[in-house]
Image (cartoon, grey):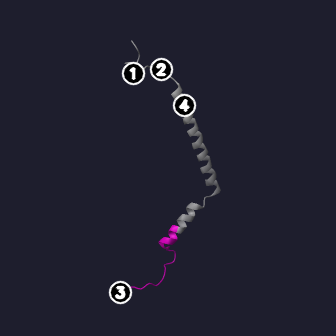
Amino acid sequence: MSDVEYVGKIKGIKTFKEHEQERLLKSMVIPASELAKRKQEELDRAKEFTRSREDESFYARTKRSVSPDCPTPIGEGVG
């Protein structure tokens, strides 16, 4: 191995640092269409969260139709 010497960089091959910098820049630059898509997804997620919160508060205000000490499971006929 003592006769190995550095000649130069092979064309088209990137160093790890160059590769990571390029990957970082690609992840930072987002096309406008992608931004619009992400914004719509975030709005949909917020609406869904609001709906689920309202459903939970409605459910908490309603009374159960069967008493907890009733031996008949829900869905079975009585008698």
Q: Position of residue 8 (x, y in %)?
A: 48, 82
Amino acid residing under circle 2? Ser
Asked if disc 3 and disc 1 are in contact, CB closer than 8 Å, the reply is: no
Q: Position of residue 59 (x, y in %)?
A: 52, 28
Q: Secondary structure at mark 4?
A: helix
Asked if disc 2 and disc 3 are in contact, CB closer than 8 Å, the reply is: no
Q: Position of residue 1 (x, y in %)?
A: 34, 84
Q: What residue did someone put label 4 on?
A: 57
* Identity of the residue furthest to the top in this view: 79
Q: Secondary structure at mark 2?
A: loop
Residue at x 53%, y 68% (from the top left corner):
21
- State which mark lies toward you, 2 or 3: 2
Q: What residue did someone put label 2 on?
A: 65
- Between the residue at mark 1 and the residue at mark 4, the CA separation in whole angstroms equals 25 Å
Start-end of magenta stretch = 1-20
Q: Earlier in the sequence, mark 2 or mark 4?
A: 4
Asked if disc 2 and disc 1 are in contact, CB closer than 8 Å, the reply is: no
Amino acid residing under circle 1? Pro
* Identity of the residue furthest to the bottom in this view: 3
- Between the residue at mark 3 and the residue at mark 1, the CA separation in whole angstroms equals 82 Å
Q: Secondary structure at mark 3?
A: loop
Q: Earlier in the sequence, mark 1 or mark 4?
A: 4
Q: Earlier in the sequence, mark 4 or mark 3?
A: 3
Q: Earlier in the sequence, mark 2 or mark 1?
A: 2
Amino acid residing under circle 4? Ser
- Between the residue at mark 2 and the residue at mark 3, the CA separation in whole angstroms equals 86 Å
Q: What residue did someone put label 3 on?
A: 2
Amino acid residing under circle 3? Ser
Residue at x 61%, y 44% (from the top left corner):
43
Q: What residue did someone put label 1 on?
A: 73
Residue at x 62%, y 53% (from the top left corner):
35
